[in-house]
């Protein structure tokens, strides 16, 4: 992961996605300007990864050498309360024998292995999420939650991570 701009004309690269940076963004704590970001989306995901204690992502990414071109994501402040309405849940979720519930979401903004890794780590930082499995090729995530947890909470968390969620009807 190189984030340098030197006299030899090397390009400044985004700390998160490794794309060239035209106008760098930095965290307020980065007084020496060592970690440049290409957009608010990458800066936000970087901050989330560190805040959630998932820092090992960057060493996994560096060792895997899997890089894909990405674009910034759009953030919206939405409550998603409609998802927890009884009629909606009947059409969009499945209740398991245990009382736990499952719902599929189409996600906007899926770009790379970082997206996969972060979304599948949700059970580690969202207490009501039991299981999260992402099909990257379809941008489809299947989420299993505890019986007393809220799918609106899940949707808000996905949205806060930068992935606009769209619940899918049961087939």
Image: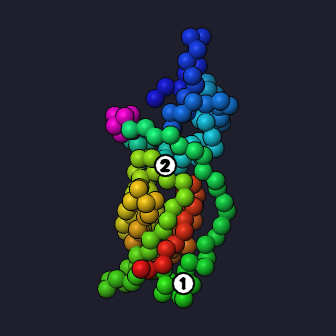
Q: Nearer the viewer, residue 80 or 54?
A: 80
Q: Secondary structure at mark 1?
A: helix
Q: Nearer the viewer, residue 7 or 58?
A: 7
Q: Secondary structure at mark 2?
A: loop
Residue drawn at point x = 49 percent, y = 49 percent: 111
Q: Which mark is residue 111?
A: 2
Where's residue 71, x and y in %?
57, 44
Residue drawn at point x = 36 percent, y = 66 percent: 131
The verdict on residue 62 being magenta is yes
Residue drawn at point x = 63 percent, y = 40 percent: 39
Picture quadrant of residue 159: bottom right
> Which residue position is annotated with label 1?
88
Chain part drawn in magenta: 59-65
**Above/below status of 66 relative to 148:** above
Q: Nearer the viewer, residue 77 or 126?
A: 77
Circle 2 packing at 10 Å, graded few (<14), some (14-19), many (20+), is: many
């Amino acid at each position: 992961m190189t984030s340098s701009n030197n006299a030899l004309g090397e390009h400044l690269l985004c700390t998160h996605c490794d794309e060239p940076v035209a106008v760098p963004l930095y965290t307020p704590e980065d007084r020496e300007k060592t970690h440049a970001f290409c957009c608010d989306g990458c800066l936000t995901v970087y901050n989330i990864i560190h805040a959630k204690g998932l820092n090992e992502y960057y060493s996994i990414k560096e060792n895997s050498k899997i890089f894909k071109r990405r674009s910034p994501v759009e953030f919206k402040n939405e409550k998603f309360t409609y998802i927890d309405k009884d009629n909606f849940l009947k059409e969009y979720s499945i209740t398991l024998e245990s009382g736990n519930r499952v719902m599929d979401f189409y996600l906007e903004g899926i770009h790379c292995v970082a997206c996969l890794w972060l979304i599948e780590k949700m059970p580690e930082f969202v207490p009501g999420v039991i299981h999260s499995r992402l099909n990257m090729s379809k941008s489809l995530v299947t989420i299993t939650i505890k019986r007393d947890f809220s799918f609106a909470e899940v949707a808000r968390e996905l949205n806060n991570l930068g992935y606009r969620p769209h619940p899918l009807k049961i087939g």
